[in-house]
Amino acid sequence: MKVAERIKKIPPYLFAQIDKKIAELRKKGIDVISLGVGDPDLPTPPNIIDALEKAVRDPECHKYPDYEGSLDFRKAVATYYKRRFNVDLDPESEVMALIGSKEGIAHIFFAFIDPGDYALIPDPAYPVYKTATLFAGGIPYTMPLLKENNFLPDFSSIDEEIAKKAKLMFLCYPNNPTAAVADEKFFEEAVEFAKTYDIIICHDSAYAEVTFDGYKAPSLLSVKGAKDIGVEFGSLSKPYRMTGWRLGYAVGNKDIISALGIIKTNVDSGQFTAIQRAGIEALLGPQDSIDEMLKIFKKRRDLVIETLREVGLEVEPPKGTFYVWVPVPEGYTSSSFAEMLIEKAAVVVTPGNAYGDRGEGYVRISLTTPDDRLKEAMRRIKESLSF
Ligand SMILES: *Cc1c(COP(=O)(O)O)cnc(C)c1O
């Protein structure tokens, strides 16, 4: 059997070594705590589950769904955008339902990247941007996210020849994995750059609602002119703890949405209508469960920051996402630090270089582990670093 070249281009799985270690320790009966995955431990709010239960019994939901999402779901997304960002969206042409935002993020490259085309991709980043570029035959051009630039790309450092050839650019704020946030001024710069070089902006806003300390994340689409060249990918996974439900959306420029739709209609047949109805309840129903969740994450964030300080690692409390991006102590690499924590503390963190070369020197700690387990993990990390 010979797999396609595009499979061979995908970078090797960086967690293989770590997964092996975890398996070894667990086999020995050691209690391993994982702070690796970004999947909320809290359950989906009950009003959303009730809505699904009701919808699932309605025969109208048992048929093939609408490709672009039910009009009611798309209207709910538009209502959320108006309420939250004061952005007007036409539910018919500027909103599309996705089977989780990852689905749309991966497919958009097939709508705009031809073999040999450049895509501007942040580094470090959610790995899908790069792998989808490669699947489409494109060339990822990395925009380094550096601490000295607050983990924002520096558009002026992008090679002009590449900028002219680039078809699309991905951004993500609040950012996974660095937990950095962006203000509207940054999006204005991005739009100006993109318009100058005729580049599409795709903004991954999976963490728009996961923010702290009074900070509210802006939408790319709030910026004047953004809708001429941009789309935003949203997800119900993180704000409503619906990662397993697979529901997201793309909003913004209608021509971009329509091109994405052409790819999608030829690959999938849309998300289960009953799940979309539950999504309507999530977006339009009571929102207090988000605040409750944020209180829990904030307490965990502060505990992690305090522990890191105690072992001499100064990290600013992040204003967004449920991650902490931690510079490794001197003498360690991302991998050697992650391995040390597994061996000495039986705690799993994600090595930063799993998100790109510029992630080297960092590890990512996820706050999606129950309080008592996180506390125990912090106790063990402290112990492993203090002798
Ligand atoms: C979790 C996540 C997503 C994907 O979420 P879905 O469950 O597919 O909607 C997209 N982007 C980033 C950066 C994420 O962390």
Image: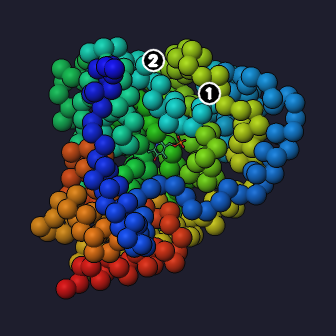
Q: Count every numbered label the image shows and give the total.
A: 2
Counting from the top left corner in percent of width and height, residue 262 is at 55, 14
Q: Which residue is mark 2?
A: 111
Counting from the top left corner in percent of width and height, residue 92 is at 69, 22
Counting from the top left corner in percent of width and height, residue 313 is at 25, 73
Determine whether label 1 and label 2 are within 8 Å by CB. Answer: no
Q: Secondary structure at mark 1?
A: strand
Q: Residue at x 17, y 59 (%)?
A: 333
Judged left or right of residue 110, residue 332 is left
- Is residue 149 depicted above or below 190 in this figure? below
Q: Is residue 334 in view from this perspective?
A: yes
Is the residue marked by circle 1 packed among few (<14), some (14-19), or many (20+) residues within 10 Å? many
Counting from the top left corner in percent of width and height, residue 315 is at 30, 69
Q: What colour scheme governs how the chains and residues are painted in the rendered image of this protein?
A: rainbow
Q: Which mark is residue 8?
A: none
Is the residue marked by circle 2 packed among few (<14), some (14-19), or many (20+) residues within 10 Å? some
- Is residue 297 depicted above or below 229 in this figure? below
Amino acid at the residue labelled 2: Ala
Judged left or right of residue 51, residue 144 is left
Name the image quarter holding the C terminus.
Answer: bottom left
Q: Is residue 178 in view from this perspective?
A: no
Q: Residue at x 57, y 37 (%)?
A: 100
Q: Name the residue furthest bottom.
A: 387
- Is residue 379 depicted above or below 56 in this figure? below
Amino acid at the residue labelled 1: Met
Q: Secondary structure at mark 2?
A: helix
Q: Residue at x 35, y 79 (%)?
A: 380
Q: Which residue is mark 1?
A: 96
- The quarter of the picture where residue 8 lies is top left
Q: Residue at x 72, y 39 (%)?
A: 275
> How far apart are the two marked residues, 1 and 2, measured between alpha carbons?
14 Å
